[in-house]
Image (tube, grey):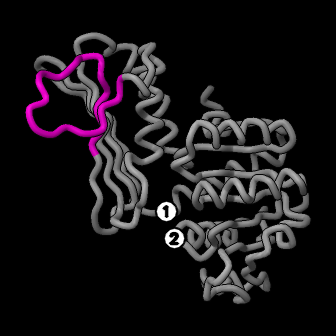
């Protein structure tokens, strides 16, 4: 069986490094292309050198040329970069695994339209553990639907540019959907001053930024006399990379469409 040809966007970043390392260690995958923005000092360098395993693939800013012949592009960049790559992948018939956060409703709709032509796995978090937590949250939300206040607490490194994290919002969406609520209407993203008593129909979010925290997420169900906490803590970006590579394998054997990690892991 031929190896799956993987392209990586943002190959010089923290996630890019983890993905390069993951591909190098996989027997069924091969690095096909490594992308960086124009002006990056890494352009022209061997992408494998970033993970200590030179492979002959040069880092490029020419996405259309580099993606020719690729099977899957893995993209954990910014919304504008991801949508640029989406157009190219649709043109070339290259599937995408997208872990980019901060996409708005219109941008997410663009993914859905593109999925008529290519396979896309889009998830706010590619970790197998986090996606298991999503499933656990459905059960917890059904059981604790009444009499429990719900708060989502997340912590990330000082360099993260969006808040709350895509994973935190994903957790909130799972809870809200299970409870029959609209997260856009019931979410509370900040509290300051005299706020009055807590509205029991709301879902609160708290954000921490500092140091090199890879990603901590807790959903708190606080009732009378007890509280239940469902927590996931990531100690390495390798967990996200391994999930993204698993998603790449999923796209290799499935038709065009818009999928998430629940599909990849068979949790639906």
Rendered residue at 78%/62% (across/down)? 28
Report crowding for label 2: few under 14, some 14 to 19, many 20 or more residues within 10 A (C-alpha).
few
Q: Kindly indicate the quadrant of the structure image that contains residue 202.
A: top left
Residue 189 is one of the magenta-drawn residues: yes
Percent position (x, y) of residue 166? 47, 45
Q: Nearer the viewer, residue 191 or 98?
A: 191
Position of the C terminus, as image quadrant, is top right
SS at circle 2: helix
Q: Which residue in the protein does label 1 denote?
A: 237
Query: Is residue 175 visible to us here?
Result: no
Do the CB atoms of the residues marked 1 and 2 lie less than 8 Å apart?
yes
Percent position (x, y) of residue 97? 69, 51
Query: Is residue 37 visible to us here?
Result: yes
SS at circle 1: loop
Rendered residue at 56%/49% (across/down)? 126
Q: Kindly indicate the quadrant of the structure image that contains residue 41.
A: bottom right
Which residue range is magenta in the image? 186-206
Mark 1 → mark 2, Cα distance in angstroms:
8 Å
Of label 1 and label 2, which has the lower sequence position?
2
| Chief SS of the magenta region | loop
Report crowding for label 1: few under 14, some 14 to 19, many 20 or more residues within 10 A (C-alpha).
some
In the rendered image, the vertical position of residue 183 relative to residue 34, given as above or below: above
Rendered residue at 71%/41% (across/down)? 111
In the rendered image, the vertical position of residue 6 relative to residue 140, given as above or below: below
Percent position (x, y) of residue 180? 45, 13
Numbered mark located on residue 14 in the image: 2
Numbered mark located on residue 119 in the image: none
* Outermost residue toward the top in this view: 146
Percent position (x, y) of residue 181? 42, 17
Q: Kindly indicate the quadrant of the structure image that contains residue 51.
A: bottom right
């Amino acid at each position: 069986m031929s190896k799956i040809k993987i392209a990586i966007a943002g190959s010089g970043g923290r996630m890019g490094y983890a993905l390069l390392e993951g591909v190098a260690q996989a027997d069924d995958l091969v690095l096909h292309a490594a992308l960086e923005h124009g002006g990056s000092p890494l352009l022209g360098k061997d992408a494998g050198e970033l993970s200590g395993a030179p492979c002959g693939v040069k880092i490029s800013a020419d996405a259309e040329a580099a993606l020719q012949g690729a099977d899957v592009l893995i993209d954990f960049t910014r919304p504008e970069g991801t949508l640029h790559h989406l157009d190219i992948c649709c043109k070339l018939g290259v599937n995408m695994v997208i872990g980019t956060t901060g996409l708005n409703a219109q941008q997410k709709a663009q993914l859905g339209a593109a999925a008529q032509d290519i396979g896309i796995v889009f998830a706010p978090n590619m970790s197998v553990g986090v996606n298991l937590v999503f499933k656990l949250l459905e059960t917890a939300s059904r059981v604790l639907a009444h009499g429990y206040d719900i708060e989502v607490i997340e912590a990330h490194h000082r360099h993260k540019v969006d808040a709350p994290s895509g994973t935190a919002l994903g957790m909130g969406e799972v809870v809200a959907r299970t409870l029959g609520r609209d997260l856009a209407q019931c979410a509370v993203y900040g509290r300051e001053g005299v706020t009055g008593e807590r509205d029991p129909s709301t879902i609160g979010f708290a954000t921490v930024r500092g140091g090199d925290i890879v990603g901590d997420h807790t959903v708190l169900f606080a009732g009378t006399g007890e509280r239940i906490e469902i927590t996931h803590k990531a100690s390495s970006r390798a967990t996200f990379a391994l999930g993204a590579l698993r998603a790449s394998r999923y796209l290799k054997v499935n038709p065009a469409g818009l999928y998430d990690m629940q599909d990849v892991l068979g949790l639906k």
